[in-house]
Image (cartoon, rainbow, N blue to C red):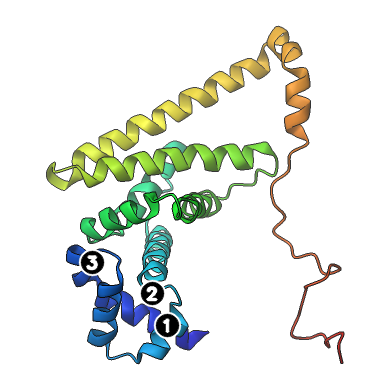
Amino acid sequence: MAENQSVTEALLDAISIHVAFDGWSKDSFEAAVMDAGVDMADALAACPRGAYDLAIAYHKRGDQMMLARFKTEDLSDLRYSEKIAALVRFRIEAVGDKEAVRKASALFALPANAGDGAKLIWNTCDLIWNALGDTSDDVNWYTKRATLSGVYGSCVLFWLGDDSEGNADTWAFLDRRIENVMQIEKIKAGVRKNPLLTGLFAAPNWFLSQIKAPSSQRMQDVPGYWAADKKSHSE
């Protein structure tokens, strides 16, 4: 696994110069394999779908760069909404090549790939909320990530067309989107405090209260679970 990861990293470093011209394509992948001096068999073992897997790895690399920066920045004086905006900004700034993101956006916009694209954005937003210590375990777990996914996705698209100095227009756009989200949260809080509206939404609220966040713990008593310190059932 570690070997495959090192091969993937080498290919990611090599493919960037080719993506600008050929996108996340077979030609780019083959050129990256040659430039990185990697055997094609090893390259395909690490990335069975070629450049497509590298595009996914490229996004995940950006996620890890965002988290690494978050650990080094002091955000203690920021409001919670400002911390969310800061992490979204860290994630966008983790990308050094707009063209690579532009090509990836086009790739994941294809109907066959849209599911993977949506999952990548969702996972990015999940990492952001987790980094900020989100402890929600009900329907809010889903709404927070869905809402932030919309904010993040719209900001990336805005950023791709932004030619302002230092991407100042993008950061202003981000602040406006975060402010919109906070206004929605204020409205929701107002509804919860209003006796009339609370009664009106009693049934829907009860239903929503039954929705729980995915468990972060593995279930050890179901088929398919394996642990290194346990003997196989087949022995």
Sooner in the amino-acid sequence: mark 3 or mark 2: 3
**SS at circle 2:** loop
Q: Estimate the spatial distance between the alpha carbons at disc 3 and disc 2, rounded to whole Å.
A: 13 Å
Q: Which type of secondary structure does the marked residue at label 3 adopt?
A: helix
In the displayed structure, 17 sits above or below 217; it is: below
Q: Amino acid at mark 1?
A: Leu
**Identity of the residue drawn at 77% across and 18% down:** 202
Q: Residue 114, position in %: x, y?
A: 45, 50
- Amino acid identity at mark 3: Val
The mark that comes first in sequence, 2 or 1, is 1
Residue linked to disc 3:
19
- Residue 56, percent from left and from top: 42, 64
Name the amino acid, label 2: Gly
Residues packed near mark 1 inside 10 Å, few (<14), some (14 to 19) or many (20 plus): some
Kind of element beneath mark 1: helix
Label 1 sits on residue: 44
Label 3 close to label 2 by CB (< 8 Å)? no
| Mark seen at residue 50 | 2
Real-space CA distance between mark 2 and mark 1, rounded to the nearest whole angstrom: 6 Å
